[in-house]
Image: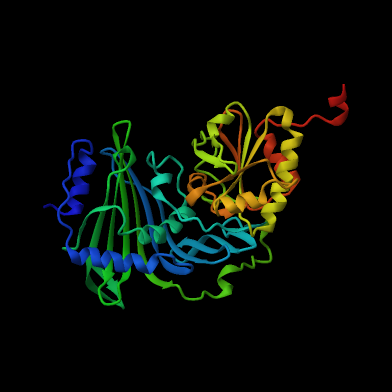
Amino acid sequence: MPSITTFVLALSVSLPALSFSQPAIPSNPAAVARVLADQYSNLRQFSFDGTLLFERKNGLDAREVLASWKVKVAMAPGGKYLLWAGNDGVLKYLVVSDGKTVWSYMPELNQYTRHEGGATEVGSDPDDIFAKGVPDGDHDVVFCSRLVVPALARLSRNSVFMEMNRTTTVNYKGSEQQFPVLSVLSQRGENDSQILIELAFEPESNDVHRFEWSRAMLVNEDSRFAFLTVEFEKRTLGKPIPESFFTLAPPGDAELVDELPIPGLDGSPLLGKQAPDFELELINGTKVHLADFKGRPVVLAFWTVNCASCRRELAALAALQQEFQSQGLAVLAINAEGKSVATRSAGAADFPPLAIYDPGGRVHRLFRAHFAPTVVVLNSEAKVVRYLSGARDAAALRAALKTAGLVNQPPSASKQ
């Protein structure tokens, strides 16, 4: 039986022609997979430092590097989040949330943003995001940094093959050592896709030192691949993280601006693109597709129940929907915390009438709603024209709607 690595290399040459028979899974790899997955399941807070490399490959083309960063990542309950991204010790950008306010900072521009909001606690899912390969411009390091822990937590689910028959060199405690590699191959999914996760780990502590995630798929009979590699330098799992991680005091001479070009906060992978269709349910059980609103401008408003700024923004959007009713504006208020949450909130006079719950956060992931509130504005052709991460006031929301062609008539003109 060839190794999984050999299998994936063959896959990159001729994906459609491969067949795969499942061998007996040795107990040792399966036991290791369960132990490693248990460390990351239901993990409420964590931090890690390391090197992140994100690549794609189309057909027989060479791999293309989309992102290569030194990163520091931390997450804690209540929407707290930190992402430090840079190279050679130099900060490129910083994203911080204390659960009530989101800051972002870019030293090269000496600019920062400050908006009300916190990180959503929806796990990243590469099956949804990369269902059609990795699109141009998709360099979302915020997403990649949030993919690692959910992928590890799902390590032993839906696997067809595991092996642990090789070692790799890891720099551990100042010296190079040989660590075993656990390889886990998933079942085939949509678009004939499979995911391979390979982990280099220290056997005694089960500390993961290298995480390699790759996905192979077919799109219109073409093979496409996505690759994410993280080399961990240090990590903390489950232990309290200092509050100082989640606050930001920008330099005194930094300029406060409304937006910064940070992938994952500015919606760059989505802007100008056709919005992906989805099917969800209104709280009354009626199924709704995004395509049902064809020919109408649409606002997707992602929110959480304990987010006061979300409620203020939803109230402003409800008023704007009434104001632009004659032009067909539809506001979809999308919550991933459960149907009961959405049901309790809907029906209020200051709440958009189309309240939707998003089981598992799939639509949150499709639209990169990393922070709550997030507003995505679609024009009448269902193209994404604005992406607003963090709360905005009514004036800013009205300006965003103008990009979808919505311009309100003054009262005097409407009476004529």
Residue at (18%, 36%) from the top-left corner?
17
Q: Can residue 167 be seen in this view?
A: no
Q: Which residue is drawn at 59% across and 53% down?
A: 340
Residue 379: quarter of image = top right
Give the tally of numbered discs: 0
User: Residue sitting at 30 percent across and 72 percent down?
Assistant: 206
Q: Is residue 93 above or below residue 170?
A: above
Residue lying at the far left of the rendered structure: 1
The answer to whether residue 24 is left or right of residue 74 is: left
Residue lying at 62% horizontally and 49% vertically, measured from the top left: 343
Closest to the observer: 222 or 291?
A: 291
Residue 172 figure quarter: bottom left
User: Could you say which quadrant of the image residue 3 lies in?
Assistant: bottom left
Left or right, 365 with reference to 350: left
Q: Where in the figure is residue 323, as x and y percent of width and height?
A: 76, 35
Question: Of 205 and 48, which appears nearest the observer?
Answer: 205
- Can the viewer see residue 156 in this picture? yes
Is the C terminus in the top left, top right, bottom left or bottom right quadrant?
top right
* Depicted 295 relative to depicted 89: above or below: above
Tell me: residue 5, above or below residue 94: above
Residue 215, given in percent of the width and then of the height, sits at: 32, 47
Furthest-front residue in view? 284
Measured from the top left, where is residue 141 in percent x and y? 46, 54
Residue 362: horizontal and vertical position, in percent? 48, 47
105 to the left or right of 139: right
